[in-house]
Image (cartoon, helix red, strand yellow):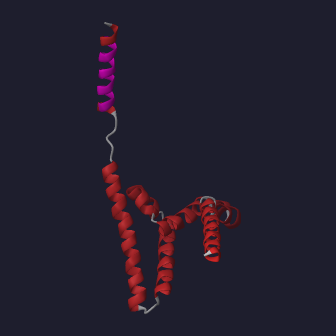
Amino acid sequence: MQDAKNRKEAQRYAELVARLAPKSEMGQGMARAFLVGGLICVLGQMLTDFFSMRMRFGAQSAATATSICLIFLSALLTGLGLYDRIGKFAGAGSIVPITGFANSVVAPAMEFRREGLVMGVGAKMFSLAGPVLVYGIGSSIIVGLIAFALEVIG
């Protein structure tokens, strides 16, 4: 008798949770992330094509100019407060490597700008990006040493 009562209570609770729980928007979020991330990549490809075809840059110079432009644009949009809106809409799609990294460097600096140029902007600029830089530089050194060792052995 008690078992049947417990099952009925559990079923009513499950129905209540199903009715009151917010619906997942994962499908929409993934679509927005894919769309915005894709648009950032399309912009990067357009810039690369512009620099290589119109400006007659070599492949390496065009890639460098494209990186500079994407970093500048994401830093500018962060400074204007627009990159946060893009991030809220796109989620992970706004963290396309170079633009997301530029945003992670500029955002803390903008947050602490009232504390002054040195103690605010300068000190806080790398608070989020610092660990990423350390990991990236450290792992590239390790990979370089492994590649060097394999070259010497082989």
- Measured as percent of width and height from the top left, residue 127 is found at 63, 59
- Measured as percent of width and height from the top left, residue 103 is found at 52, 64
Residue 119 shown left or right of residue 63 in the figure: right
Quadrant location of the N terminus in the rendered image: top left
Residue at image point 64% right, 63% down: 134
Seen from the viewer's position, the closer of residues 58 and 146 is 146
Q: Is residue 37 above or below residue 154?
A: above
- Measured as percent of width and height from the top left, residue 64 is found at 51, 81
Among all residues in the image, which is located at the extreme right? 119
- Measured as percent of width and height from the top left, residue 5 is found at 31, 12
Among all residues in the image, which is located at the extreme top? 1
Report the magenta stretch's main SS.
helix
Residue at image point 64% right, 66% down: 142
Q: Is residue 6 above or below residue 52?
A: above
Among all residues in the image, which is located at the extreme bottom? 56
Residue 73 shown left or right of residue 153 in the figure: left
Quadrant location of the C terminus in the rendered image: bottom right
117 magenta-colored = no
Quarter of the image holding residue 8? top left
Residue 152 shown left or right of residue 27 in the figure: right
Seen from the viewer's position, the closer of residues 102 and 146 is 146
Q: Which residues are magenta?
A: 5-18
Seen from the viewer's position, the closer of residues 67 and 108 is 67
Q: Is residue 91 above or below residue 80?
A: above
Quarter of the image holding residue 21? top left
